[in-house]
Image (cartoon, rainbow, N blue to C red):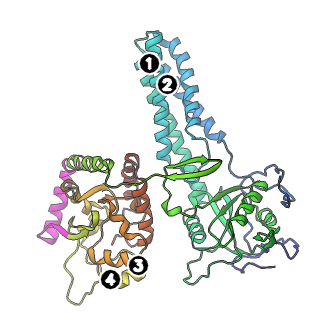
């Protein structure tokens, strides 16, 4: 029997097991978060059903959200009736009842009541606005063409405004409560990860760092885990599987079901491992037969985009990945919109720009703007503009070396251990007002509103040699804000993590994603306001 390393506290109760079972001693005893589920028949030879019911995963249909949305639609209908002229009261009551039912049906079709680990409020809000608008327009056309109702457009507009506002407000409040409960560990699924390799450990670390996903790893199962050579392994115990030989294949032992039951696992994640294809297929079927949800990390996960197409050719499933063309017409349209938006933004923020420039002039003198070479689209250099925030270094002050920055895997810059920022400069940096002159970079065509943040040429060469896929970020123009920035990766944070998020943006870019990032930038700035930024 292969025992797990003693990383967590011993369980208060232990099960007597045979030599073929998995030893789960030392795994933290955390109460289950869901009600017991009914056992399902195994349906497979050699697959043993658990001795007791397992913890169920999330419901396939979120009845609570459905009920809240139905109540909000009823309130919206009431508000629409109250605001309508008395002459159309009867028509409003009937049509609004139909409107509410159709909106709920469209929301169900859009999948708003299916559980999602990575659900986001803005995605839900977009679906709600679209659903209410679609139903309102369809009912308007029907009532105008069939019933010749001249007030149909006004009635539909009232219904759309009230319904979208009420449902979005309720969904936002529920989202805040749900995220808080997940971060506090009140709710969440217990997950067993199959495969303790680099990808499995990275996935577990991401789940531990982001508890709002609602998936908590409790253990790995792997007979040949990756050695912890760099001390970066997540604090999750690794269990052996006591494999058995069957038909020339090395399969997971019968203790798998015991581990699922004893750890009260409701979700199994199959990650990269040294197991054969047949062993993983056997594992997948056994987990399904045990009544737990199974997720599989694709082996080519770094090349997978959000826009996937699943087809079957001769009964064999095939997944098609959308090609990403940063030189296509979509990006030409994006860059054109960037310049128009930047021009309006400069006009709107011109008083703030003048005040910041005057404060910089009074504290640091000329020049007001700081120019620095950065690398952008296709590796071409350009001068990025910022308000000056620091005094010149003294002769005895030495800047951090490039090799030190790469060794620490953080974004370099400044003088290590010496704060040269003025009081005005500190405020400009913490509020990110010092970045506003980059609107002129966008207007000139050097940068975009949304994209990876640019870096200095000397560091680009170093990071290109030490960070996987770093050069891929130069497929698009650099941005004032980006996907990695709104995820909290600003200042001295991991370059590798930034690259991962930036490449995700490039391969999944859309007008909606750009708009979403711009909206998320405001709360991100407010959240980081007051925090020191290098």
Q: Is residue 10 visible?
A: yes
* Classed neighbour count for the residue bearing mark 2: other residues with Cα under 10 Å, few (<14), some (14–19), many (≥20): some
Q: Which mark is residue 7?
A: none
Q: Is residue 369 magenta?
A: yes
Instruction: Tell us which disc is closer to us: 2 or 1.
Output: 1
Which residue was labeled with disc 4? 402
Instruction: Tell us which disc is closer to us: 3 or 2.
Output: 3
Q: Position of residue 397 (x, y in %)?
A: 25, 87
Q: Earlier in the sequence, mark 4 or mark 2?
A: 2
Q: CA distance from mark 1 to mark 3?
A: 59 Å
Question: For residue 450, what is the image quadrant?
Answer: bottom left
Q: Earlier in the sequence, mark 1 or mark 3?
A: 1
* Classed neighbour count for the residue bearing mark 4: other residues with Cα under 10 Å, few (<14), some (14–19), many (≥20): some
Q: Residue at x 40, y 19 (%)?
A: 154
Q: Position of residue 491 (x, y in %)?
A: 37, 70
Q: CA distance from mark 1 to mark 4?
A: 64 Å
Q: Earlier in the sequence, mark 4 or mark 3?
A: 4
Q: Is residue 492 magenta?
A: no
The residue segment tinted magenta is 345-371
Instruction: Tell us which disc is closer to us: 1 or 3.
Output: 3
Q: Is residue 302 left or right of residue 420?
A: right
Q: Which mark is residue 79?
A: 2
* Classed neighbour count for the residue bearing mark 1: other residues with Cα under 10 Å, few (<14), some (14–19), many (≥20): some
Q: Which mark is residue 466?
A: 3
Front residue of this view, candidates 141 and 120? 141
Front residue of this view, candidates 462 and 244? 244
Q: Earlier in the sequence, mark 1 or mark 4?
A: 1
Tag 3 secondary structure: helix
Q: CA distance from mark 3 to mark 2?
A: 60 Å
Q: Main secondary structure of the magenta part?
A: helix
Which residue was labeled with disc 1? 141
């Amino acid at each position: 029997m292969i025992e797990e390393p003693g990383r967590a506290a011993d369980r208060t109760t232990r099960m007597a097991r045979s030599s073929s079972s998995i030893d789960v001693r030392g795994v933290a005893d955390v109460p289950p978060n869901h009600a017991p589920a009914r056992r399902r028949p195994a349906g497979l030879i050699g697959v043993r059903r658990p001795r007791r019911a397992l913890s169920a995963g999330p419901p396939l249909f979120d009845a609570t959200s459905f009920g809240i949305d139905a109540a909000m639609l009823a309130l919206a209908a009431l508000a629409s009736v109250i605001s309508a002229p008395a002459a159309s009261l009867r028509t409003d009551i009937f049509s609004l009842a139909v409107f509410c039912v159709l909106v709920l049906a469209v929301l169900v079709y859009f999948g708003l009541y299916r559980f999602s680990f990575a659900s986001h409020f803005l995605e839900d809000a977009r679906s709600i606005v679209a659903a209410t608008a679609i139903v309102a327009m369809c009912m308007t056309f029907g009532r105008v063409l069939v019933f010749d109702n001249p007030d149909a457009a006004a009635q539909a507009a009232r219904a759309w405004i009230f319904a979208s506002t009420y449902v979005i407000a309720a969904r936002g409040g529920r989202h805040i409560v749900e995220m808080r409960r997940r971060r506090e560990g009140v709710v969440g699924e217990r997950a067993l990860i199959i495969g303790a390799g680099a990808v499995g450990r990275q996935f577990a670390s991401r789940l531990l760092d982001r508890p709002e996903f609602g998936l908590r790893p409790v253990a790995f199962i792997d007979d040949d885990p990756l050695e912890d050579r760099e001390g970066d392994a997540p604090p999750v115990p690794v269990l052996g599987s006591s494999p058995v030989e069957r038909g020339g294949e090395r399969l997971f032992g019968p203790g798998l079901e015991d581990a699922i039951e004893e750890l009260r696992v409701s979700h199994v994640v199959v990650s990269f491992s040294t197991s054969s294809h047949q062993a993983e297929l056997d594992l997948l079927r056994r987990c399904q037969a045990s009544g737990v949800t199974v997720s599989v990390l694709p082996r080519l996960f770094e090349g997978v985009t959000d826009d996937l197409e699943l087809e079957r050719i001769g009964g064999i499933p095939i997944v098609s990945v959308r090609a990403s063309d940063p030189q296509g017409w979509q990006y030409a349209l994006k860059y054109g919109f960037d310049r128009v938006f930047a021009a309006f933004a400069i006009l709107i923020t011109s008083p703030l720009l003048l005040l910041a420039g005057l404060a910089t002039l009074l504290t640091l003198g000329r020049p007001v703007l700081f120019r620095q070479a950065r690398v952008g689209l296709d590796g071409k250099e350009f001068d990025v503009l910022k308000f000056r925030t620091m005094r010149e270094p003294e002769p005895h002050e030495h800047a951090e070396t490039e090799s030190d920055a790469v060794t620490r895997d953080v974004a370099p810059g400044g003088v290590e251990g010496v704060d040269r920022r003025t009081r005005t400069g500190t405020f400009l940096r913490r509020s990110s007002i010092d970045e506003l002159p980059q609107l002129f970079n966008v207007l000139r065509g050097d940068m975009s509103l949304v994209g990876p943040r640019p870096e200095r040429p000397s560091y680009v060469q170093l990071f290109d040699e030490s960070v996987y896929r770093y050069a891929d970020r130069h497929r698009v123009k650099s941005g004032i804000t980006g996907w990695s920035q709104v995820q909290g990766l600003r200042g001295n944070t991991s370059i590798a993590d930034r690259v991962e998020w930036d490449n995700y943006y490039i391969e999944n870019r859309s007008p909606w994603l750009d708009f979403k990032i711009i909206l998320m930038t405001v709360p991100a700035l407010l959240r980081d306001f007051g925090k020191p930024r290098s």
